[in-house]
Amino acid sequence: MSQLRELVDKYFSELHDSKRENLARNIDKINTVTACQFCNSTTSRDVHSISMYELFEKLHSNREMLVDGVREACASILKKKQQSVEWKLEAVREAYESQVLDKILDS
């Protein structure tokens, strides 16, 4: 959150403190996803083609465009992560069913 505050302070210094804080919090909410340990660790190294810094640099002239740009980038990242986790969970499920389940049922 402190990095977002720094970016908001840098690019929106003309705003009142409370408006800058609200903007930083709004972007932080968009950028935050609750995930289990498996999903988080499985996708934590995934990177989008544009960074938060680059989004601010590109879209800082319009707050609404910035928030929409962050929302679109985060949605894209989330979709990619969901696809990655889905594939990995399916692989784990297949391995469990083919290598573990029969041993459990036999015992």
Image (cartoon, rainbow, N blue to C red):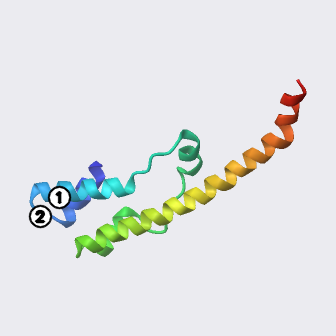
Q: Horizontally, is 11 left or right of 106 in the view?
A: left
**How busy is the neighbourhood of tag 2: few (under 14 within 10 Å), some, or many (20 plus)?**
few
Q: Horizontally, is 28 left or right of 40 in the view?
A: left
**Front one among 12 and 96:** 96
Does residue 76 sit above or below 36 in this rendering? below
Please, what secondary structure does the residue beneath circle 2 have?
loop
Residue at the spot 81% in from the left edge and 42% down from the top edge = 97
Q: Which residue is mark 2?
A: 15
Residue 105 rendering spot, x and y as whole percentages? 86, 30
Point out the residue furthest to the right here: 106
Residue contact at pointers 1 and 2, CB within 8 angstroms: yes
Does residue 49 sit above or below 31 in this rendering? below
Point out the residue furthest to the front here: 105
Residue 34 rendering spot, x and y as whole percentages? 45, 46
Point out the residue furthest to the top here: 107
Q: Horizontally, is 90 left or right of 77 in the view?
A: right
Disc 1 residue type? Arg
Q: Horizontally, is 26 left or right of 88 in the view?
A: left
Residue 51 rendering spot, x and y as whole percentages? 41, 64
Quarter of the image for residue 72 reads bottom left
Spatial CA span between label 1 and label 2: 6 Å
**Front one among 86 and 70:** 86
Total numbered labels: 2
Q: Which residue is mark 1?
A: 20
Residue at the spot 34% in from the left edge and 70% down from the top edge = 68
**Front one among 55 and 83:** 83
Residue at the spot 20% in from the left edge and 56% down from the top edge = 22
